[in-house]
Amino acid sequence: MRILVTGANRGLGLALAQTGAERGHHIVAGVRDVRQGENKLSDFEFSKSVSIVPLDVTNEESVIRAANFVKEQFGSIDAIVNNAGILLERDKTIEELNLDQVQVSFDVNLFGPMRVVKYFLPLLLMGDSTTIINISSEAGSFDNAYGGDYAYAGSKTALNMFSQQLSKYVNGNNIQVYAVHPGWIKTDMGGESAPGDPNDTANGILELIENKRRIESKYVFIDHKGSPMPI
Ligand SMILES: NC(=O)c1ccc[n+]([C@@H]2O[C@H](COP(=O)([O-])OP(=O)(O)OC[C@H]3O[C@@H](n4cnc5c(N)ncnc54)[C@H](OP(=O)(O)O)[C@@H]3O)[C@@H](O)[C@H]2O)c1
């Protein structure tokens, strides 16, 4: 399958690109800094199965150019993983909160996936059975609200709603849509003390894309093993 991964130069995105290529897929690796992407992705066993494309999800022109690149090179795509995300204003109280940073968070974590879906959906619709995965977080769950992380948590809750609405919109087109909590994983964002290995999460997400997991969930918000997440 051909799979677009945003934020593919480090963390979970890098694990998805490398694991996906190892599993026999062709990865379109969206990165903000191509040189950094090449450093990470051009020197491993399956690097021939990776195409690096410049992609800043906050820049609509950049998203359009990436979609045009995929259309010209491959004609269509089988899956999108909206992985790029940022965690700003952690632990700030409402009195301390910098609202510009809240806007930036929504621009990357919510509007980013919306821009990508807007311009890549026509390429997904060309396939027989395709997938959109929006990488969410348990922080976006009402059940897990812990009295902070206004920027990150709010943007992920909204991403869950976008995913649910989108799944209804594409219903009947053989496109599966999920908002996936990847677990607390060891990345720059997750930190050193995180228990999870991004490669395990990446394998779980690829199994979802490969339709190897039976999903029994009323809503599209699930974890990387396919279990329902609390709304
Ligand atoms: N780590 C965890 O424990 C955890 C838990 C729950 C959910 N998540 C979610 O999992 C996803 C991946 O997180 P991670 O832990 O791998 O984070 P990370 O290590 O901080 O990596 C974030 C990635 O997003 C990219 N990115 C940021 N802004 C971007 C933009 N405007 N356009 C394109 N790419 C952009 C970064 O690119 P640059 O290198 O150019 O900055 C980087 O590749 C995120 O959506 C995050 O919210 C993570």
Image: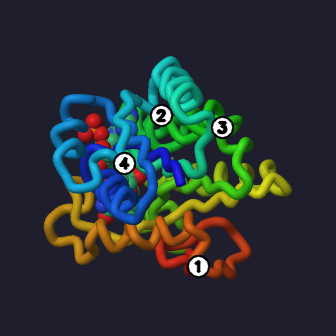
Q: Nearer the viewer, residue 113 or 67?
A: 67
- Which mark's residue is nearer the viewer, 4 or 2? 4
- Whether residue 116 is situated above or below residue 158 in the rendered picture: above
Q: Which residue is mark 4?
A: 49
Can residue 143 be seen here? yes
Q: Secondary structure at mark 4?
A: helix
Q: Which label's residue is closer to the chain start, 3 or 2? A: 2
Instruction: Check mark 2 vs ligand 1: CB closer than 8 Å? yes or no.
Output: yes
Residue with the most extreme right position: 172
For label 1, count other residues whose C-alpha is less than 10 Å away and answer few (under 14), some (14-19) or many (20+): some
Q: Which residue is mark 2?
A: 107
Q: Which label's residue is closer to the chain start, 3 or 1? A: 3
Q: Which residue is mark 3?
A: 123
Please, which colouring scheme is shown? rainbow
- Which mark's residue is nearer the viewer, 4 or 1? 4
- Mark 4 and 1 residues: CB-CB less than 8 Å, in contact? no
Q: Secondary structure at mark 1?
A: loop
- Mark 4 and 2 residues: CB-CB less than 8 Å, in contact? no
Which residue sits at x=25%, y=49%?
Answer: 10
